[in-house]
Image: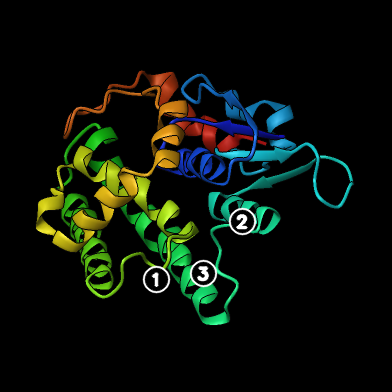
């Protein structure tokens, strides 16, 4: 049994999709990050970086104590290892999957995350920031589109790399980047979207944290802003 500590964000969806795809039992523990649930001492014992998602494997394969894992890419790799699924065993294919997983963790997620911040959360529109991050978000989607013009899935076969990237591409509509501009990416997105495990994984966790109307600003009060981006975030221990 896996405990999943999560909020309904692209990174959170990675975990529930993965668990549904590999057929591993899990229990979701929802968090209200606007209220600061992520700063509770019991969660900081799981992830000292106070970010979601995180998991706790209550019955790890080594027979030891419950094992916590944080960082969504590390969670995908851990679940692939213990299940023997969705991470190719052949050397080159395995490292193809690893490279595209790292592409998501180091590029696609952070850059799209910044685009979301300045489109949806920043109180004022800052032209330089919007241009910088939306252009980079689009560039990264072009990289994926080029790769997917050559292969069916990012590592050739369906893998944790696809699970890592798909929720961020799903969220691109919220920052008004149309998939129609990227035909290979759109073909891949629709193929992954049709998978029963992906549908179950998003249905299990898809309770909107904030309004997802494309391009709409998310109103935050002073306390919520402090919790997500300001003093409370920086002072967390």
User: Upstream in the sequence, badge 3 or badge 2?
Assistant: 2
Mark 3 vs mark 2: in front: 2
Mark 3 to mark 2 CA distance (whole Å): 12 Å
User: Upstream in the sequence, badge 2 or badge 1?
Assistant: 2
Q: Which numbered disc covers residue 80?
A: 2
* Label 2: few (<14), some (14–19) or many (≥20) C-alpha neighbours in 10 Å: some
Mark 1 to mark 3 CA distance (whole Å): 12 Å
On screen, residue 46 versus residue 6, left or right, reads right
Q: Which numbered disc covers residue 231?
A: none
Which type of secondary structure does the marked residue at label 2 adopt?
helix
173 or 110, nearer to the observer = 173
Give the residue at mark 1: 156
213, above or below 142, in the image: above
Figure coloring: rainbow
Image coords of residue 162 (percent x, y): 40, 57
User: Upstream in the sequence, badge 1 or badge 3?
Assistant: 3
């Amino acid at each position: 049994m896996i405990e999943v500590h999560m909020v309904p964000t692209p990174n959170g969806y990675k975990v529930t999709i993965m668990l549904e795809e590999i057929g591993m039992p899990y229990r979701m523990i929802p968090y209200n990050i606007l209220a600061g649930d992520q700063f509770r001492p019991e969660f900081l014992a799981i992830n000292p970086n106070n970010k979601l998602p995180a998991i706790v494997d209550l019955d790890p394969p080594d027979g030891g104590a419950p094992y916590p894992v944080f960082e969504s890419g590390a969670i995908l790799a851990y679940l692939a290892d213990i299940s023997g699924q969705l991470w190719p065993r052949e050397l080159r294919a395995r490292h193809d999957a690893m490279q595209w997983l790292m592409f998501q963790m180091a590029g696609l997620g952070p850059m799209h995350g910044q685009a979301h911040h300045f489109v949806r959360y920043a109180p004022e529109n800052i032209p330089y920031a919007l241009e910088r991050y939306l252009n980079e978000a689009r560039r990264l989607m072009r990289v994926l589109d080029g790769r997917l013009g050559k292969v069916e899935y990012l590592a050739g076969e369906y893998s944790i790399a696809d699970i890592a990237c798909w929720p961020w591409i799903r969220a691109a509509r919220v920052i008004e980047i149309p998939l129609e501009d990227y035909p290979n990416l759109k073909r891949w997105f629709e193929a992954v979207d049709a998978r029963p495990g992906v549908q179950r994984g998003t249905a299990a966790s898809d309770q909107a944290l904030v309004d997802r109307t494309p391009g709409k600003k998310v109103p935050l009060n002073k306390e919520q802003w402090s919790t997500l981006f300001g003093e409370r975030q920086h002072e967390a221990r």
